[in-house]
Amino acid sequence: MIARNPVAVEVCDAKLDAQSAPSLSWNQQIADMIKSPQELLSLLELPEALLQDALPGHAQFPVRATRDYVRRMKKGDPSDPLLLQVLPLHLEQQEMIGYSADPLSEADYTASKGILQKYHGRALLITTSACAIHCRYCFRRHFPYSEHRQSRAQWKEALATLPGDGGVSEIILSGGDPLMLNNPVLDELLTLIAELPQISKVRLHTRLPIMLPDRIDQGLLDLLSNRPFKTIMVIHANHGAELDASVEKALARLRPVVHMMLNQTVLLKGVNDDSSTLAALSERLFECGVTPYYLHQLDKVQGAAHFDCGDERLSSLMQALRAKLPGYLVPRLVREIPGAPSKTPIFA
Ligand SMILES: *Cc1c(COP(=O)(O)O)cnc(C)c1O
Ligand code: SF4
């Protein structure tokens, strides 16, 4: 979690006036994130009429996006695929049968506070509730995060509940976004994990390399280096336009210190639900040294029904995608079914 230092905010406002935003530290850029639909619409030169539609969704799950991310959106285009991921629409307010606040029944799987173990061999640690973006389709938009806010002592306690016999060999750092933690805190957490001899892999699920390439600083590279476990970075890009030159550079900095870089995508109607967009994303990920991993069918979370592509088109979509890409760039299409022993493949 980020200390919102008022002095830092003042400094960053002054610099923004001087049009020198890139020189802000990553913490300052987080403090300076876009936090209102008004500002988002005005930066993108979109009609104010869209505001009324955005306000109810904003009240439920507030708008959050970094300025870096918003700069990659096309001005004046209300259907920009990046914008659709962050701007609340009136459609969120529809009550839809089959959509719930906790579609993955995560409440049932909390082994101890802040740790979720659903699958054999890997346990997921909730590190922070903070994110550098609020994705409108997020399956955790209704998640009771306050119950999962952890102190360092609680991490230690949660990690101590893991079986010592090799039953769990991988820790997944999730949240929220684990890279929202400051370097000293993350360093301490990785050091705690390094003391567990049964852990051979640590995975970070993060959107920060995309939302805020400056987050990939030297301190982060240093604290990831020379650990007794192998580190896997899973980023989350939904569209090729998210991966601009600054993101590519950040990923290039990460590559030497991590064992694997993977990407997961959520299939989103109006954002990426066509084979050309998905193929372009895979090719762009390849250029950035990242392997496509999962393509998730949307979790049925209340407020996200307008992103649902349904199942009928999946087969033709995947066939078209396979026809455009080498096999190693085709992501695995999966959905999450509560109680299943893994993500469930969709053979489409
Ligand atoms: C998705 C998920 C994982 C990771 O699954 P993989 O198939 O290994 O990527 C682990 N734990 C939980 C709780 C998950 O939701
Ligand atoms: S970054 Fe991940 S956890 Fe955060 S809002 Fe987006 S999808 Fe949800």
Image (cartoon, rainbow, N blue to C red):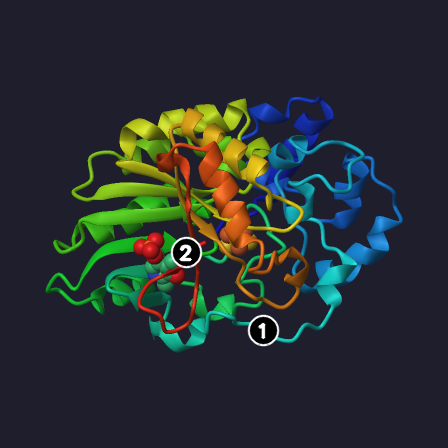
Indicate which disc, 2 or 1, sits on the residue closer to the N terminus.
1
The answer to whether residue 241 is above or below residue 140 is: above
Q: How far apart are marks 2 and 1 (CA)?
A: 25 Å
What residue lies at 33% left-to-right and 29% top-to-bottom? 255
Label 1, ligand 2: CB separation under 8 Å: no
Please give the residue where the numbered disc 1 appears in the rendered image: 100
Quadrant, the C terminus: bottom left
The answer to whether residue 338 is above or below residue 278 is: below
Q: Horizontal placement of 310 versus 293: left or right?
A: right
Which of the two residues, 108 or 190, is positioned nearer the viewer here?
Answer: 108
Q: Where is residue 15 in the image (x, y as percent from the top left)?
A: 66, 26
Q: Horizontal placement of 44 versus 249: left or right?
A: right
Q: Horizontal placement of 231 versus 302: left or right?
A: left
Provide the secondary structure element on which disc 2 rests. Answer: loop
Q: Position of residue 37 (x, y in %)?
A: 76, 49
What residue lies at 60% left-to-right and 46% top-to-bottom? 273
How many labels were placed on the picture?
A: 2
What residue lies at 64% left-to-right and 48% top-to-bottom? 85
Q: Which amino acid does label 2 sit on?
A: Phe
Please give the residue where the numbered disc 2 appears in the rendered image: 347
Provide the secondary structure element on which disc 1 rests. Answer: loop
Quadrant containing ligand 1 reads bottom left
Q: Position of residue 33 (x, y in %)?
A: 63, 42
In which quadrant of the rendered view does residue 108 lie?
A: bottom left
